[in-house]
Amino acid sequence: VEAERYLHKAVSGYFSPLTLHEEEVWHDYGLALWHVGRGIEAVQNFNNAIITNPAFPKGYNNLACALVMLAVSTQPPNHQALQEGLQAMEQAVTMSPGTPLYWRNAAALLALAGDRQAAAGAWERLRQLDPATAA
């Protein structure tokens, strides 16, 4: 809750652009919101991070995770949010193909979406990048 308060101040203009990139503030506020159960607001802040810096793979990665988790937590699943989340994940791995975390998340999200073949492909890519983690 304390982190959320400080990050809210940061995204409201109480920070110096010389100390932290704005997309990082939006992103971190989104993470704080996610961890206190405010998923829709988290998605909005991840989107703000990407709007601020469209070349921000970390923002796409966490946007993807949030969207897919929110999509599959409803009955019936929210197919639009699911597709948007998978597109964001594709953006993250395209922008930063050497980041094992993004491939691990892609494998998990694709499995949640029911695409076992694509999930296996993402896991294989993770195994190539980081055999110890994928073991």
Image (cartoon, grey):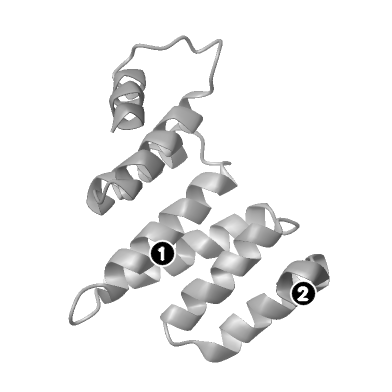
Residue 85 numbered tag: 1
Q: In which quarter of the image is the N terminus?
A: top left
Q: Identify the residue at the far left of this view.
A: 75
Instruction: Name the foreground residue: 61 vs 2.
Output: 2
Distance from disc 2 to disc 1, alpha carbons, whole Å, reads 23 Å
Instruction: Identify the secondary structure beneath mark 1.
Output: helix
Q: Estimate how packed mark 1 is, as few (under 14), some (14 to 19) or many (20 or more) residues with alpha carbons within 10 Å.
A: many
- Amino acid identity at mark 2: Arg
Amino acid type, label 1: Gly
Could you tell me which residue is drawn at 36 percent across and 20 percent down?
10
Earlier-in-chain disc, 2 versus 1:
1
Say left or right for 135 vs 75: right
Q: Residue furthest front?
A: 2
**Left or right of 103 in this view: 28:** left
- Viewer-nearest residue: 36 or 121: 36
Q: Nearer the viewer, residue 7 or 115?
A: 7
